[in-house]
Image (spheres, coloured by chain):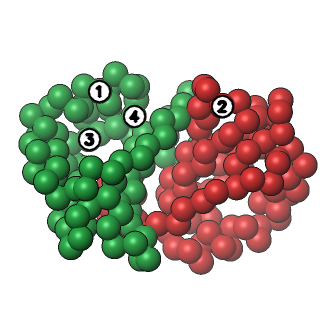
Chain colours: A green, B red
Amino acid sequence: MRTRPGHREEVVSILLGGADGLRAAGCHVYVVGVSDDDDQTIWVNEVWESKEHHDASLRLPETRAAIATAMPLLTGEFTSQEIRVLGGLGVPPE
Amino acid sequence: MRTRPGHREEVVSILLGGADGLRAAGCHVYVVGVSDDDDQTIWVNEVWESKEHHDASLRLPETRAAIATAMPLLTGEFTSQEIRVLGGLGVPPE
């Protein structure tokens, strides 16, 4: 996702602020990162127990509040790639 | 990474075959996934203790053997994005 100039760190804080509650919602991995040569973009990699768990998490009051707080700080540019996880380290076996 | 037609599952097996040894090499997350609408592409998301740990892992005999086995099955098309991990779930705090 792309943030308005000067707001990257604020959005990172919002994203990380909700990380503690993610495991109970069915999230296995949630990685927030940035690149030192792009001060407006934030990358988020997530692995969920199922698509349904992810969809349900978006309806949680705390998620909705975080999205509402972050939205005005974003440009609206999002790219995403949904994948089917086959295995690895830090994720349950399929 | 992109595989030659018909070789996606074989390359996935090679990638997953080395997953057990990754933690000892300094890897925190290693996610191998595919998309159901693209039968030649494999996505790999990795989080490492440091760039040095990742670089060192590429020099391990088992890694070199896996790369040598997979290489003829790939088209040579790779895209990657290196990010600095700031936190989340499943990764150590910065």
Alpha carbons under labels 1 and 2: distance apart: 23 Å
Measured Cα–Cα span from mark 3 to mark 4:
9 Å
Q: CA separation, marks 1 and 3?
A: 12 Å
Quadrant showing the C terminus of chain A:
top right
Residue identifier under label 2: B38
Is label 1 or label 4 in front?
Answer: 1
Q: Is residue A93 left or right of residue B71?
A: left
Query: Which mark, residue A22?
Result: 3
Q: Secondary structure at mark 1?
A: helix
Q: Chain of mark 1?
A: A
Inter-mark Cα distance, 3 to 2: 29 Å
Do callouts 3 and 2 mark residues in contact (Cβ within 8 Å)? no
- Badge 2 amino acid: Asp
Give residue A48's mark: 4
The residue at 21%/73% (across/down) is A6
- Chain identity of mark 4: A
Residue B82 percent across, percent down from the top left: 53, 66
